[in-house]
Image: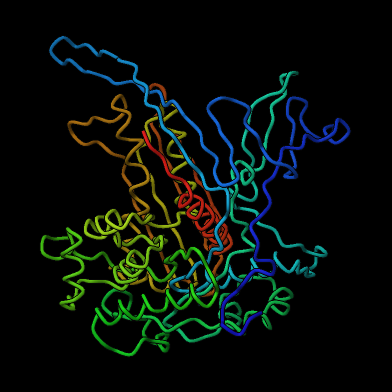
Amino acid sequence: MPANGHVTPQNAKAPAVVEVNILSEDDQAINPADHYGVTPDYSIQVNGRNTIYSNEYIESKYMYEMNHCDVDHQAKEVKITPRKYQYNFRTKRQVQRTGVMLVGWGGNNGSTVTGAIIANRDKITWMRKEGEQFPNYYGSLTQSTTIRLGSNNEGKEIHIPFNTILPMLHPNDIVIGGWDINGANIGEAMERACVFDYALQEKLKPKLSKLKPLPSIYYPDFIAANQEDRANNLIPKGTKQQDLEHLRNDIRTFKRNNNLEKVIILWTANTERYTDVRPGLNTTKEEVLQSIADNDDEISPSNIFACAAILENCPYINGSPQNTLVPGIIELAEKHNVFIGGDDFKSGQTKLKSVLADFLVSAGLKLESIVSYNHLGNNDGKNLSAPQQFRSKEISKSNVVDDMVGANHLLYDKKTNEHPDHVVVIKYVPFVKDSKRAMDEYISSIFMNGINTIAIHNTCEDSLLASPLIIDLVILTELMTRITYST
């Protein structure tokens, strides 16, 4: 572990390109008869005129087909015209040496991501009553899921690991750093989070205690007042323009000290209240930068971090439900050709809600009421106990059903803007710590006006569900920066 306060990979080299290796018939005996698994030993090679390989690039042509619909309301007629669009994709094969700077590194998510990567990288095992435990990346789409690639001559489907479809960054090679308003080192933050088994904490603490977050910016109006006692690791008080320049310098220093090609900035800090969106403040890139220069009160910490990332050509990922990505910041990112995205991780109750609501409506059942109750005891729950911060989360949790309701005018009358009743409750209960309890009730009208009720109790290990998504976001964002396309 280097003394620079960042987690670095042991072997800083690009991962080898992998080929498909079909498991033997003996190995397949344990698998379903109609499927073949593959191991990531060799490269995947597409044999076709639309894909070209060179040492530097994978180039491919893709024909995207869609239907254009013309609706004639007078004739009550819909005319469909098939359309084709050709896209040319170019992917750089060399994975970049990549670091992520977490805003809120000392929080539960930050310490969990860091500890998990070190445990996997160093193959740390630990004991609990069920026996010896081994680290893994369960919950990560890139590391723990497969993709159906096609079928062989016998008609058996071929499934490959997600991360072998294109050259991807390995999580063990991610360099981690970041900021936090609290000065606890990452070892202390891990203990405070109460996420990992104690035996694992004991093995990780000597490594994590060497890591300390950089001072961060703190504008009390944007997060709950109950966070003030944590704010002991702050950038010296100055103007918002000075804060922006300070963060840009932090990013440059992190990139230089770790010899990185790409740095990704990811917000996993406290949920902020919504900021105003209005002309003169943040509707254009010029307004945003001028508002920062003017030290405007409505410029939030996440606005500053997003602008710093964009101006340093670093992708910015927003992992909280506040409206960081205002129109002016989106325009600034477009000007600098920088990836931005995100409006909450949605890793537990909200993820389940989006799937279950879609299932019910797609089955032709009229979802009438969704009532969601949560209680949790981590610092996220403490911050969300304040009304303005809760409102940001409430909007995020409520919006997930809008698209599926809007897509079915047979069940929901668009003229009256008919929509299911939707209530979200979040309570802070310190005793449960990071182990969030989520209780949901879904009431639907069914055949011949019957009523169906589904009630769910879900224990969501908050950070253990969110952390693999953070890893995926970093991996996929790095991949996206190596892909260009033309039409």
Judged left or right of residue 286, residue 98 is: right
Question: Is the image coloured rainbow, by chain, by secondary structure, or in one colour?
Answer: rainbow
Residue with the most extreme left position? 280
**Which quadrant of the view contains residue 172?**
bottom right
- Location of the N terminus by quadrant is bottom right
Where is residue 237 shown, x and y percent of the image? 29, 89
Judged left or right of residue 253, residue 131 is: right
Where is residue 153 shown, x and y percent of the image? 73, 18
Where is residue 383 shown, x and y percent of the image? 39, 73
Q: Is residue 389 above or below residue 145?
A: below
Q: Is residue 487 above or below residue 137?
A: above
**Which quadrant of the view contains residue 170?**
bottom right
Where is residue 416 shown, x and y percent of the image? 18, 34
Total labels: the figure holds 0
Residue with the most extreme top position? 75
- Picture residue at 58% right of the left edge, 65% below the top: 174
Residue with the most extreme front position? 55
Judged left or right of residue 326, residue 9 is: right
- Name the foreground residue: 172 vs 104: 172
- Picture residue at 76% right of the left edge, 66% below the top: 123
- Name the foreground residue: 328 vs 482: 482
Judged left or right of residue 280, residue 20 is: right
- Location of the C terminus by quadrant is top left
